[in-house]
Every structure is written in structure tokens, then in C-alpha cells.
Amino acid sequence: MIYREAVSKVIAERFVHSALLMAFAWVLSGVIGFAAGVAAAWRKDSWLDRLIKSYCYTLASTPAFWIGLLLMMIFAVWLGWLPVGLGVPAGMLAGSVTAADQFRHMILPAVTLSVVGIAPIALHTRQKLIEVLDSDYILFAKARGERGMGLLLRHGLRNIALPAITLQFASFGELFGGAVLAEQVFSYPGLGQATVESGLRGDVPLLMGLVLCSTLFVFTGNVLADFFYRMVDPRLRQGKVGRG
């Protein structure tokens, strides 16, 4: 009703922009959050641990739109390094837009999403790894002479892999919700902005299509999590979990 086009066409045109944005933010937040959580747990109670925890607690209580406005003010207005918003340069023909132009316009929304998503992954990974490092089998491994990165890689990371995968793929729903705010702040032409417009202007068919699309998005995340479970844990492939 708003765009005078089929709902499937509107979603297909905007899905590419949102998919690139959310994929970039998802990978960035997952990698940085996991690495930060591991570093904080490995150096528990050190200055690095306190710094990471302070950063995470601050971001966990900060709205995504405020982070977006702050990044826009610093990097787009004050420094002028990145564009203020939109998905492509204003006034440029579609045929003249390059991949570099699209990437530059995607940086600020993607960083906004990833910065907010780092905190829960880092805190969760830190807590799980601390529990693993305090367990009896880690004490036994140390008694056998294992130390340093070998101990961490062989016994630590392998035992926190499944919880990390669970949290990472469960963040699909939060990622879509955060994209709504980020795209609205930066006027980024994705599914999030279309969701806000359809809700405010009463476009029920488009809103229903977007809700269905978000449902399939979250469902896909859960299916991928189950798939990677079987790759990481051989017991699931052999059907031995829960027996004995």
C-alpha cells in the first residue's frame, strides 16, 4: 500500500541491504565478543578483565539508537570520515553506485549493531570459561603438566563451544530488532526501516510479510545452531547424548 508494489518485491529489494548489514554485524560481534570473553576469563581479576567487564556493563545498558547517534556525530559530522546515512550516495544514479560506496554507507549501521551485540556474548563466554577453568578436569590437566595456550585450546575452548554457538545463533532475533533501530537512525533502506514505516502508516499487508520474514530469519538461526552442534560435538552425531 505504501510503495504500490507487491509485498514480496518490497521485501526482496530490501532484504539484500539488511542481510549484508546483519551478517557483517553478526560476525563482528561474535568474533570480538568471544575473544573478549576468553581474554577476560583467562586474565580473571586483572586490569584487562575489569576493563572488558566495564565496557560490557556500559554497553548492555545503552540503547542501540543512542550508540548510533553518537557514532554518527563523531565519525560523520565531526570527523567527516563516513556518510551520515542512506544506503548509497544521495543524488547518484543506481548504475553509478559502486560496491565501495555501499560498503561505506553500511559501516556505521553495522558497527552500531555489532557494538551493542558484543556485551552479552563477552559476558556469557567469560562466565562459562571461568566455570570450566575451575573444574576438576582442568586441575587434573594441570597436574599432568599442561599449561598456557595448549590448556586453553584443548580443554577450555572446546567445552565452551556449544554455549557460545547457542548464544550466537540465538541472537538472530535481537539482531533483527536492533536493525530496526539502526536503520531508522541512519535512514538505511532495509527491512527494519520498512517495518517502522509499515507500522506507522498502517500498511498491514507489508507488516505481516515482514513479520513472517523475521520469523523465518529466527527459525533459520535455530536450525543452523542445531546443525553446528553436530559438527562441534561428535556425541550428537552418534546419538549418545543422554544415554547412560
Image (tube, rainbow, N blue to C red):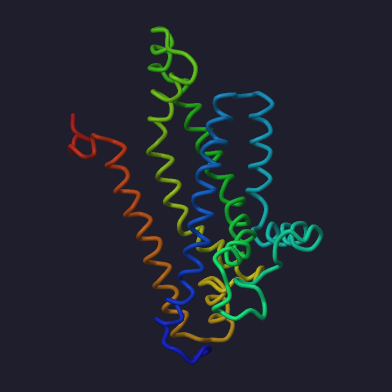
165 relative to 148 in the view: left or right: left
The residue sitting at 41% across, 78% down in the picture is 209
The residue sitting at 57% across, 74% down in the picture is 189
104 relative to 129 in the view: left or right: right
Picture quadrant where residue 107 is located: bottom right
Q: Could you tell me how many numbered marks the image carries?
A: 0
The outermost residue toward the right is 78
The outermost residue toward the front is 96
Does 193 sit above or below residue 36? below
Q: Give the image location of residue 192, x and y in percent.
A: 54, 70
Does 90 sit above or below residue 113? below
Picture quadrant where residue 53 is located: top right
Q: Give the image location of residue 170, x and y in percent.
A: 43, 52
Q: Give the image location of residue 193, x and y in percent.
A: 57, 74
The residue sitting at 44% across, 40% down in the picture is 164
Picture quadrant where residue 97 is located: bottom right
Q: Give the image location of residue 188, x and y in percent.
A: 60, 71
28 relative to 78 in the view: left or right: left
Q: Quadrant of the C terminus?
A: top left
